Image: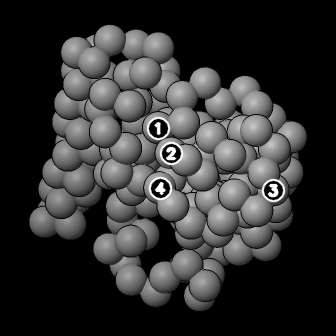
Amino acid sequence: MGERKMVEKAIKGDEEAFLELLHCYQEALYRTAISYLKNEGDALEAVQEVTYRAYRNIKTVKEPAYFKTWLIRIMMNYCQDALKKSKREVPKDRITSMQSVSEDFTFLEVEEALGSLSDYERELLHLKYFEDVKIKDIAVMWNTPEGTIKTRLHKALRALRTSFEEKGEMKRV
């Protein structure tokens, strides 16, 4: 059965269709949570909470084609709220000791560079490049013209590139 049909069935109250959809997107939800929260336990808790929120609010999905985007957006909002609530900063020594995320230093450099961006820029890059959401879909989701999204994406990429260039300059000195 197609994804659109499954979403339509889930909106009408079909629990099996909802569970199947969530099974399809659980990895994307987990990746989003771990990229924000940097902790496996918190990420798993976030997936559980977002599953509940999505189930509770499934009838608010206006366009079945944007179900994945809707779901990821719920996760991003949850993670931002969780980070604001705890007002925690992940210490650098804790990042390097986290074995469940990655021992690859390139990953840590990318995380550090992403950390230098605004929340909006990080969300935009996450949607576009980690979740592979189309610019058109992001524009619809954020109720913003496509041209504006493209401009902001270009600006975010330029800021990310600048962050890497500055880091490269420090290593050469």
CA gap, disc 4 and disc 3 = 16 Å
Q: Residue 86: where, in percent of width, then height?
A: 84, 46
Q: Are marks 2 and 3 in contact (CB under 8 Å)?
A: no
Q: Which mark is residue 65?
A: 1
Lower position in the chain sequence, tag 1 or tag 4: 4
Look at the image and tell me whether residue 68 can be seen: no
- Amino acid type for the residue under numbered disc 3: Glu
Q: Are marks 2 and 4 in contact (CB under 8 Å)?
A: yes
CA gap, disc 2 and disc 4 = 5 Å
**For mark 3, what is the residue?**
15
**For mark 2, what is the residue?**
4
Residue positioned 65% across, 74% down in the render: 94
Q: Secondary structure at mark 1?
A: helix
Vertical side of 15 occupied by 120: above or below: above
Q: Which mark is residue 2?
A: 4
Lower position in the chain sequence, tag 2 or tag 3: 2
Residue positioned 78% across, 51% down in the render: 14
Q: Secondary structure at mark 4?
A: loop
Q: Which mark is residue 97?
A: none
Q: Are marks 1 and 2 in contact (CB under 8 Å)?
A: yes
**How busy is the neighbourhood of tag 2: few (under 14 within 10 Å), some, or many (20 plus)?**
some
Q: Secondary structure at mark 3?
A: helix
**How busy is the neighbourhood of tag 1: few (under 14 within 10 Å), some, or many (20 plus)?**
some
Residue 134 lies in what quarter of the image? top left
Vertical side of 89 occupied by 76: above or below: above
- Amino acid type for the residue under numbered disc 2: Arg
Q: Residue 78: where, in percent of width, then height?
A: 74, 42
Q: Residue 172: where, in percent of width, then height?
A: 13, 66
User: Which is nearer the eye, 113 or 134?
Assistant: 134
CA gap, disc 2 and disc 3 = 15 Å
Indicate the colouring scheme. one colour
Question: Of discs 1 and 2, which sits in the foreground?
Answer: 2
